Amino acid sequence: MKNPKFNEKFNKIFNLELYQNNPSDYVHSHVDQIISLLLYAWAIANKPQSPKDTQIVALLLFISSESKGLLEQIRTGEGKTLILGLTAAFFALCGYAVDVVSSNRDLAIDGEQKCRTFFELLKLESGHICSENDDINHQSYRPDLSTKQDRARHVLYLSHEIASLKWLETLFINIWAAVLRTEVNNSNEISQNIEDISYFMKKNIENKNIYVSEYLYDYVDYKLKRWIDSAFQGRIMREDDHFVLDIPKADGQNIQKHRTIIVVDKDTGTEQYSTRWSNGLAQFLELKYRRKLSVESLKAVFISNKTFFQRYKTHLYGLTGTLGSENSQSFLADLYNVQFADLPTSRKKSYYRFPSKASFEHEDWLDSIARESIQQVKIRPVLIICENVESTENIWNELIRHGVPPHTIAKYRRDGGRGTDIQVDSSVNKDGGLHVILSYLPDNVRVEEQAFWTYISK
């Protein structure tokens, strides 16, 4: 985007020898001038949007936090992308390479695209590393700013397949068959079942009833109980809850498209196309759903989220809709040497929370949701937030069975609200606004707050 007036202001500052010699010192000593330029650039790139007071305060807090990192609580709908863009640009102009880590692929791509014109005005390059093409991802490490996704996992692994592990297929098949034959009356019995099956498998390997190459004996002995435990996990895991059967995005151009097992992160609801379960779990699920059996991969390199974020030392900054409990904040403060800020909303939020309802039977739960939806949809739109794909479809079918009019109720899994802007007509507010039904009990208060604030605050 070309803007002669802005370019003149920009060049007047950044062509100075003082800036060229020491960008960080110059930017910090001329903060008012730099911030004014950033706000002007954002207004040009994103007409008619311009930063609000709360967003400017959030930027100033990040800039002034030098001895420690900072995590800010910014309520949903308050413009975290804008704050992120301004903050990233400020530190990039200081001469730093800036990494932005998002919770999933779609948010990373969308955030980078929304800020790209703004960055270009400031002569900053940006990119994301969420492409399925590795060559494109490698090029994205070159810009001043790059967006990443943490996949909401605890550990990032670089793994590789070893051809000789293919000879373990027979062992995996026998483990799976043994687990299916085992009756489990309560969870306390599983430990003993693992011991029994492990002993049985070792005897069969010794007697050559199950072929395993001798050079793999130690490896099998080390992993056998873990594999059996994974088989028990795979036995109870369900499609559309822990995982989905889908065509990987990387295979989208292939002539033969095969539905494979795609991991669903239970914390965020996002589908993780490049993630695979370890310790044989992926293989046992493939056996369960009659997919082509893959070779287990061994981890060559790994780095945990903890180690990754600690490498940023005092330059770790974050935005979230909910910081969590005091215990959670204390844990994060000790782990990452960060402090916290809870910023107010730009306008007053108001919503009324009805008493919670619980059902003991699955049919009663579905019926309760359907009846509540039908009652509320007479006067205002209804949004039902579901835990997983399975419950989404069950609730949807129940609504259809009750004869709900079309185009009146929207259905979302819990990942649907991540980065999603849902706006209702102003006339709806006169009738009480959007009615939100949270159809499951979240694991913690943070997730519960996310569910309500995501939609009510629009």
Image (cartoon, rainbow, N blue to C red):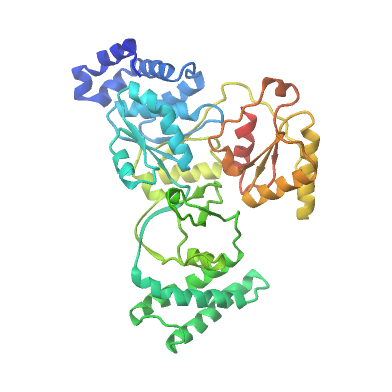
Query: Height in image: 282 above or below 322?
Result: below
Residue at 68%, 73% in the rendered image: 185
Q: Image quarter for residue 379?
A: top right
User: Can residue 388 be seen here?
Assistant: no
Picture coordinates of residue 364, whole percent (x, y): 80, 51
Which residue appears at 41% of the width and 19% of the height?
Answer: 45
Where does residue 48 sit, x and y in percent of width and height? Answer: 49, 16
Residue 320 position in % (x across, y down): 51, 36
Task: Say which quarter of the image contains residue 412.
Answer: top right
Q: Farthest top residue?
A: 5
Q: Specify whether 445 is left or right of 378.
A: left
Q: Looking at the image, how many numbered discs can be counted on the residues?
A: 0
Q: Residue at x 36, y 34 (%)?
A: 67
What residue sits 61% from the left and 30% below the top?
Answer: 422
For the residue pair 221 and 118, the one nearer the viewer reads as 118
Which residue is most to the front?
255
Asked where in the image residue 375 lies, by quadrant, the reply is top right
**305 or 391: nearer the eye?**
391
Is residue 282 among the parts visible in the rendering? yes
Q: Quarter holding the C terminus? A: top right
| Side (left or right) of 382 relative to 170 | right
